[in-house]
Image (cartoon, rainbow, N blue to C red):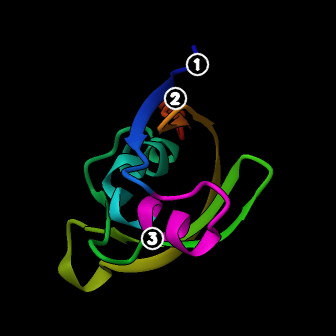
Amino acid sequence: MSDITHYQIPLNGVSPEDDVALKALFEAHAALFDSAILSTYGGDIRYAVVAGSFSVTGLSDGKVNYDCQVNYFAPCHDQNDFFQVQGSANYEVTGENIILKLDETLWNID
């Protein structure tokens, strides 16, 4: 079953044509992306997005591309790991808001 979630981000005067300001706006709302990023791991609580690591790498035609770091907390501390994750999400500008569409479907990794 698919779980596409829509989030609304107010533009607050940011022009949708200003890629630098739009990038900063997405990065300011980075926490909205966490569930979509972590859904790949099937809801496994051993994975977490590293705070402050989210970065927008590109914007084009209603799509935001990003990367971030994910931390894996292993049962044995010497097996903890960090790794880079890349992804993308669709968005549209409607009035004074960005409507961000994130796929938060939990994937079964068994």
98 is higher (above) or lower (below) than 59: above
Q: Quadrant of residue 31?
A: bottom left
* Residue at the front extreme, as displayed: 13
Which one is nearer the viewer's eye here, 75 or 85?
Answer: 85
87 is higher (above) or lower (below) than 2: below
Check contact, mark 3 vs mark 1: CB within 8 A. Answer: no
* Residue at the top extreme, as displayed: 1
Residue type highlighted by circle 3 = Ala
Check contact, mark 2 vs mark 1: CB within 8 A. Answer: yes
Residue 43 can be seen in this image: yes
Prevalent SS, magenta region: helix
Q: Position of residue 72 (x, y in %)?
A: 34, 68
Q: Which residues are magenta?
A: 14-26
Q: Secondary structure at mark 1?
A: loop
Q: Tell me the number on the disc at residue 105.
A: 2
Q: Is residue 29 left or right of residue 3?
A: left
Camera-nearest label, 3 or 1 = 3
Q: Which residue is mark 3?
A: 24
Pointer 2 or 3: first along the chain = 3
* Residue at the right extreme, as displayed: 61
